[in-house]
Amino acid sequence: MTIAPYEHKVQYYETDKMGIVHHSNYIRWFEEARVDFLEQVNMPYEDLEARGIICPVVSVQCKYVGMTHFGDIVCISLKVEEFNGIRLILSYEVKDKRTGELRCTGRSSHCYLDEKGKFVSLKQVCPEYYEVYKQVEEQ
């Protein structure tokens, strides 16, 4: 299963007074890439929520390597680093589409909870989702 990078065109409002993308936007782009990833593997987030399962961010890290500016198009690659059915760790690479230069790397940690905030195992409650994650993790 091949996951295509998510593309984002930098908007003017995402930049600061220096004309550089404000650092907080990279975290938003990670989320956009996650939602896109789930759609690519036929597991839209809203389907998970309809089953009473949420997947909050537990932690996020971001390392800024280069500057991104208004009008640039970035490609955000996402990789499943670790997945055990309850916990998920994703990594990200943000690259300039035109030059291929690395702009940022990051990681996010997530868990799966039911509507009462208790941990759930996708292996038990959504085995088809669990299998997709395991397939993607092995790539």
Image: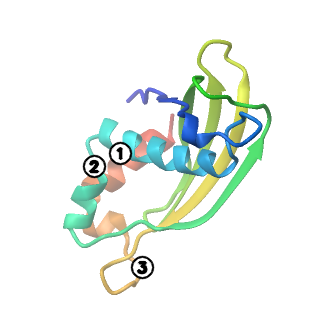
The amino acid beneath tag 2 is: Pro
Q: Evaluate if marks 2 and 1 touch, with contact meaning CB atoms under 8 Å apart.
A: yes
Q: Position of residue 108 (x, y in %)?
A: 60, 56
Measured along the vertical axis of the image, is residue 79 above or below residue 53? above
x 25%, y 57%: residue: 46
Identify the secondary structure beneath mark 1.
helix
Q: What's the residue at 26%, 65% (across, down)?
A: 49
Task: Looking at the image, tell me whether mark 2 or mark 3 is earlier in sequence order.
Answer: 2
Where is mark 2, residue-wise? 44
Q: Earlier in the sequence, mark 1 or mark 3?
A: 1
Give the quarter of the image for residue 130: bottom left
Nearer to us in this view, 106 or 118: 106
What residue occupies the far front of the structure in this picture? 17
Instruction: Give the residue pinned by disc 1.
Output: 38
- Label of residue 59 in the image: none
Answer with the quarter of the image where residue 60 lies. Answer: bottom right
